[in-house]
Amino acid sequence: MLAQLIPKEGGPTITLTQSITVVGRSGKLCDLVLEHTSISKQHCMLVKTDGLVYLRDLGSTNGTRVNGQRVIRGALLPGDLLSFASLSFKIHMGPDAAMAVPANGRTEWMPSVPDHGLNAASPKPPTHSALSDSSLSDVRFLRDSDLLIPD
């Protein structure tokens, strides 16, 4: 996943390349150094996962804000305004450039329902019995009787 911090006041975009990024003023302690007197030596931590960026303030003096609200921890969404003390950044997230277009140029997909032996010679859709409780899915089909409360 591509995660970037776009400076509100202009300047180069910061791409979060590591899964855990410590943000602060100290070059010895932090992965992302923001040289500004209002930033703490270790200001906050950003954790990048498959689809989200999580934030954890590290006890900073001037605080960390998301969309104007001071936060200690939380999940960031695309378009959120993230502020470290007086420095503000817009959050941008998307697929990695390498993942955006597969090598063969085609969109990859996986069927959501197991094939259960269906092929081009047999184009009929699966019946409920083909998708019974014995399927490989975590999802279990419920019957109306499963929802009734016993007397």
Image (spheres, rainbow, N blue to C red):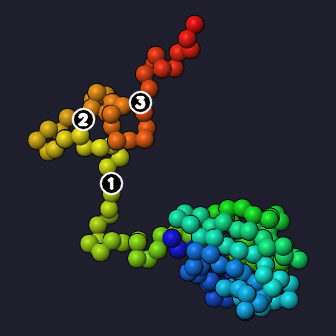
Callout 1: few (<14), some (14-19), or many (20+) C-alpha neighbours within 10 Å? few
Name which quarter of the figure residue 97 lies in: bottom left
Q: Work out whether mark 3 precedes mark 2 in sequence or the reverse, and give the earlier one.
A: 2
Determine the residue located farthest toward the top in the rendered image. 151
Name which quarter of the figure residue 57 lies in: bottom right
Q: Secondary structure at mark 1?
A: loop
**CB within 8 Å, label 1 to label 2:** no
Amino acid at dot 3: Phe
x, y (%) of residue 138?
A: 43, 41
Residue 125: mark in rendering: 2
Q: Secondary structure at mark 2?
A: loop
Q: Is residue 60 above or below residue 50?
A: below
Distance between the alpha carbons at the discs numbered 1 and 2: 17 Å
Q: Work out whether mark 1 precedes mark 2 in sequence or the reverse, and give the earlier one.
A: 1
Residue at numbered disc 3:
141
**CB within 8 Å, label 3 to label 1:** no
Residue at numbered disc 1:
110
Q: Is residue 118 above or below residue 103?
A: above
Q: Work out whether mark 3 precedes mark 1 in sequence or the reverse, and give the earlier one.
A: 1
Distance between the alpha carbons at the discs numbered 3 and 2: 17 Å
x, y (%) of residue 88?
A: 75, 77
Which residue sits at x=62%, y=84%? 13
x, y (%) of residue 131?
A: 31, 33
